[in-house]
Amino acid sequence: MAYTTAASGLTPQQWDSDFFRSYVRSSRYKRYMGTDESSIIQLNEDLTKKKGDSITFALVNELTGGGVTGSSTLKGNEERLNSRSHKLTVDVLRHAVAVDDWDQQKSAIDLRNACKTQLREWAQKKMRDDITTALGQIDGVNYSVASAAQRNTWWANNADRVLCGTVAANYAGAAFATDIAKIGSGEQLSPTLLSAMKRKAQLSSPKVRPVMVKEMDQEWYVCFVGPYAWRDLTEDNPTTNVLTLANRDARIRGVDNPLFTGDSLVWDGIIIREIPEIEGLADISGSGGARIEPVYLCGAQAIGVGFAQRTKSTVDVDDYEFVHGVGVQEIRRIEKLRFGTDPSADLTTPKDHGVVTAFVAAATD
């Protein structure tokens, strides 16, 4: 009798596919990821099907015209679709685990499985940290290495997308560090400031579009908050804090209430999500040395994740087969999406496409 057996060459491919799905699915940002233009974190895998080192995201702004009514002529009254683009250049990302005294491991597939958990956790953390870093980017440059001139240009260009503490007069727009230094220690994250961020998103030009969150079946913005700003938002005067009271009294009761589980809170059409990896500004302080922490309110197409190669596993044997290693590699890049606002040039005078950034005082414990 002839038996059908699985082709051994397919097993690594199946492992790679399962690894990719499981690590992306387990990301803290996963619920906000998608492949269309209505996703906060938009995934694009165009280069997995063709050659190249860059992926272009199409940034589509809302139509603002009134159209025509009745028997009015539509021809000649069309509205130009104000679409823009953001080119994202990918790069190779690799890591590996080496194990000695694995003589009993004769199968490379078993070795992959043995190291799967460690490599998956590393990949999850790497993607999480890369998205967190992208939220704070200055026109494609990580905040930590952006020059004063680059920060000043970003600060001025995004005037309708930034808040400097809770006092409007703090923002002058010419010098980022000078304006941040005006933020007082009492200018903490609050429900009032969250609502101000939402108004910024709605009134910005072009506006930051809200997204449809499936589990709530309506349009929302999502705000990513660091640990100390989250503390100030939720724990300061808990008996009078309107956000705490709203989530305590108007949502599910008992141990499943998000106030107990640390899950997302909601306020004024905003889903608030704590991201412990969001750090304070290391090189700039507010008034009197106040520690400053960024807060990111996000709408559609805030972040772009471009893949040219999904996760691929590799194996290696060294030192007379005493040392066995397994690695993963992928080709991708993650950036905050931005668009040019000059009507005659696609990339000139860029703004953050889907993010309103606030800087607040947030002292450490």
Image (cartoon, helix red, strand yellow):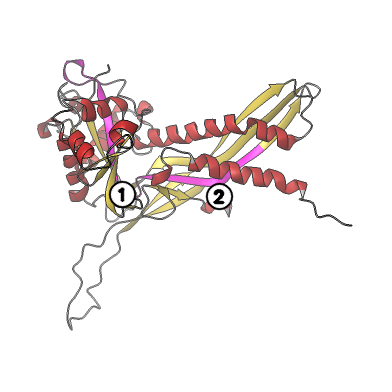
- Quadrant, the N terminus: bottom right
List the residue tagged with mark 1. 340
Q: Position of residue 174 (x, y in %)?
A: 18, 33
In the rendered view, would you say 216 is above or below 264? below
In the rendered view, would you say 196 is above or below 280? below
Q: On residue 52, which mark appears? A: 2
| In-image side of 51 versus 163 (left or right) | right
Q: Position of residue 64 (x, y in %)?
A: 21, 62
Which residues lie in the magenta part?
284-313
Indicate the amino acid at tag 1: Gly
Residue nearer the viewer, 25 or 325: 25
Contact (Cβ within 8 Å) of mark 2 with mark 1: no
Q: Residue furthest bottom?
A: 71
Q: Is residue 83 visible?
A: yes
Answer with the quarter of the image where residue 99 lies.
Answer: top right
SS category of the residue bearing label 1 = strand
Q: Identify the residue at horizontal 87%, vertical 57% (top origin).
A: 2
301 within the magenta span: yes
Few, some or many C-alpha atoms within 10 Å of disc 1 (few <14, some 14-19, many ≥20)? some
Q: Residue furthest right?
A: 1
- Quadrant, the C terminus: top left
Residue nearer the viewer, 3 or 205: 3
Indicate the amino acid at tag 2: Gly
| In-image side of 200 versus 14 (left or right) | left
Answer with the quarter of the image where residue 84 lies.
Answer: bottom left
Q: What is the CA distance from the residue labelled 2 to the residue labelled 1?
A: 23 Å
364 within the magenta span: no
Q: On residue 216, which mark appears? A: none
